[in-house]
């Protein structure tokens, strides 16, 4: 799926195209009035301003997320009640993610919360306790650190109960058996990448370094605890570097520092960011430039993004096309049409039908970020259904009254002739023309 490069009919149109491109890539698409505002400011100036904005202070205000006692979960009655609580917490948490992406005042921050939430993915359905841990994971880790420091993010996720529980490290003990799940995903997904040069021996050594990183009860919740009796005190070598004997908890911290500063990690993170913001197969020069800034800044996220987004011309290269993921499609549609979320259930049901909900990708790799995964005949049909449901105001909990006065052409930038003809089809109602615009190739890409 692709669109033609924009027509060059003057400085005003060129500025509008660049503004729309920046908003599509950095902000889940434009809301009404955004293109004009960013075009007047200048796309590059707007990007620089977004990179400099401090993260908003956001607190969890949803349902009580206190984890019940383990004994209570053995009762069938309690388990039924807990499933209801899990659903309430999950809907509230996903509703916050969706609502802030649609209407939040910090668009790049929300984009990076989505990116890191997928990079450091945890699965809500691992077991009943996992969902109770997610509000803290999102509001204590992902949100405050999304635009700060990769080493801080890496350390915060490593010791957070949601990650310890998801990848079973809370059970890892030199006495009862060292668990390699977290060590493998730490190397392959979170830092070096699958081709980062590590071996099975490195996985085993990293797993031993994290033995004893476990959990403890803390009031109505769960907190990190280091248990020295569970730790493996033997010799360890990770990526050719010896860990000093008797390091205890510091061994895990040393591994995190080693991985965060490794050249393979810089390349892996740079490539993932370039895939997110530029193209499924991003230009090698952009990746190299971004990796170099990542290393020079010691993983500072804003500096790394500045190198990627403003250090070259790739962001505004019309040949580099990205298909919207389901989450991006739903959010950008709600933003573009001015629809208001009164209750999240309808939009979340649409996301489930499209195949992507935060925290519900079944593997530690998270949701794919390439068109190959999201575009096939079945997926295209679901995208059409969503477009017509939104335009017809049939999404429960979504107020689409603003669509009544919306010009369908405002949803799109440059039009292909086929889309222009489709929008001009005789007999279409106003709402159906909006659906055609939302379902068009021009709107399906960002």
Image (cartoon, grey):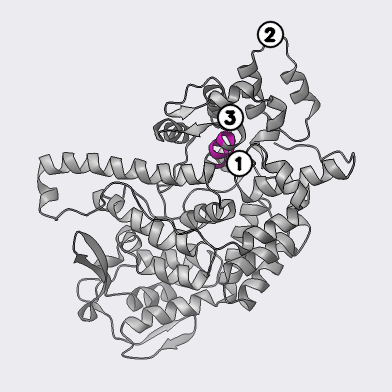
Marks 1 and 3, how far apart at CA: 12 Å
Please report whichever mark, 1 or 3, sits nearer to the chain's N-terminal start: 1
Residue 287 visible in the snapshot = no
Q: Which residue is mark 2?
A: 427
Q: Which residue is mark 3?
A: 380
Name the image quarter holding the N terminus.
Answer: top right
Please report whichever mark, 3 or 2, sits nearer to the chain's N-terminal start: 3
Pick the front one: 176 or 299: 299
What mark, if any, has residue 324 been given in the picture? Answer: 1
Write down the region rendered in magenta.
328-334
Q: Residues within 10 Å of mark 2 (few under 14, many from 20)?
A: few
Indicate left or right for 403 with 113 as reference: right
Examine the image and state in which quarter residue 167 appears.
bottom left
Examine the image and state in which quarter residue 196 appears.
bottom right
Pick the front one: 6 or 377: 6
Q: Secondary structure at mark 3?
A: helix
Pick the front one: 192 or 327: 327
As drawn, 362 above or below 412: below
Residue 167 visible in the snapshot = yes
Residue at (33, 59) in percent of width and height: 162
Indicate left or right for 108 with 348 as reference: right
Residue 155 percent across, percent down from the top left = 42, 72
Residue at (84, 43) in percent of width and height: 12
Indicate left or right for 169 with 265 as reference: left
């Amino acid at each position: 799926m692709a669109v033609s490069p924009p027509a060059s009919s003057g400085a005003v149109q060129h500025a509008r195209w660049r503004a729309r491109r920046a908003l599509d890539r950095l902000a889940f698409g434009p809301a009404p009035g955004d293109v004009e505002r960013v075009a007047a400011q200048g796309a590059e100036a707007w990007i620089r301003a977004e990179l400099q904005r401090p993260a908003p202070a956001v607190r969890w205000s949803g349902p009580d997320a206190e984890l019940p006692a383990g004994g209570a979960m053995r009762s069938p009655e309690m388990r039924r009640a807990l499933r209801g609580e899990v659903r309430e917490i999950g809907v509230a948490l996903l509703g916050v993610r969706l609502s802030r992406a649609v209407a939040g005042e910090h668009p790049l921050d929300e984009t990076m919360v989505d990116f890191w939430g997928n990079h450091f993915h945890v699965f809500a359905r691992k077991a009943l306790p996992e969902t109770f841990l997610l509000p803290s994971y999102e509001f204590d880790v992902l949100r405050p650190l999304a635009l700060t420091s990769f080493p801080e993010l890496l350390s915060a996720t490593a010791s957070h109960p949601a990650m310890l529980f998801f990848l079973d490290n809370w059970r890892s003990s030199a006495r009862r058996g060292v668990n390699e799940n977290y060590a493998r995903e730490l190397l392959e997904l979170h830092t070096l990448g699958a081709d980062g040069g590590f071996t099975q021996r490195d996985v085993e050594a990293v797993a031993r370094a994290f033995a004893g990183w476990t959990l403890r009860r803390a009031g109505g919740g769960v907190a990190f605890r280091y248990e020295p009796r569970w730790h493996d005190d033997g010799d360890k070598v990770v990526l050719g570097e010896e860990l000093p004997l008797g390091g205890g908890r510091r061994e895990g911290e040393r591994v995190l520092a080693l991985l965060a500063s490794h050249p393979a990690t810089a390349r892996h993170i740079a490539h993932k960011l370039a895939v997110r913001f530029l193209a499924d197969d991003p230009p090698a020069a952009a990746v190299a430039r971004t990796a170099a800034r990542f290393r020079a800044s010691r993983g500072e996220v804003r500096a790394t993004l500045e190198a990627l987004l403003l250090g070259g011309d790739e962001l505004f290269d019309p040949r580099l096309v990205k298909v919207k993921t389901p989450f991006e499609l739903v959010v950008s549609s709600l933003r573009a049409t001015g629809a208001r979320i009164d209750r999240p259930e309808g939009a979340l049901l649409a996301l489930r039908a499209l195949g992507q909900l935060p925290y519900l990708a079944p593997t530690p790799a998270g949701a794919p970020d390439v068109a190959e995964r999201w575009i096939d005949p079945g997926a295209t049909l679901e995208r059409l259904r969503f477009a017509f449901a939104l335009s017809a105001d049939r999404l429960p909990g979504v107020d689409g009254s603003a669509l009544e006065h919306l010009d369908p052409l405002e949803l799109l930038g440059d039009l292909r002739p086929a889309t222009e003809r489709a929008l001009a089809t005789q007999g279409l109602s106003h709402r159906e023309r909006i659906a055609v615009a939302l379902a068009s190739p021009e709107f399906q890409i960002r």
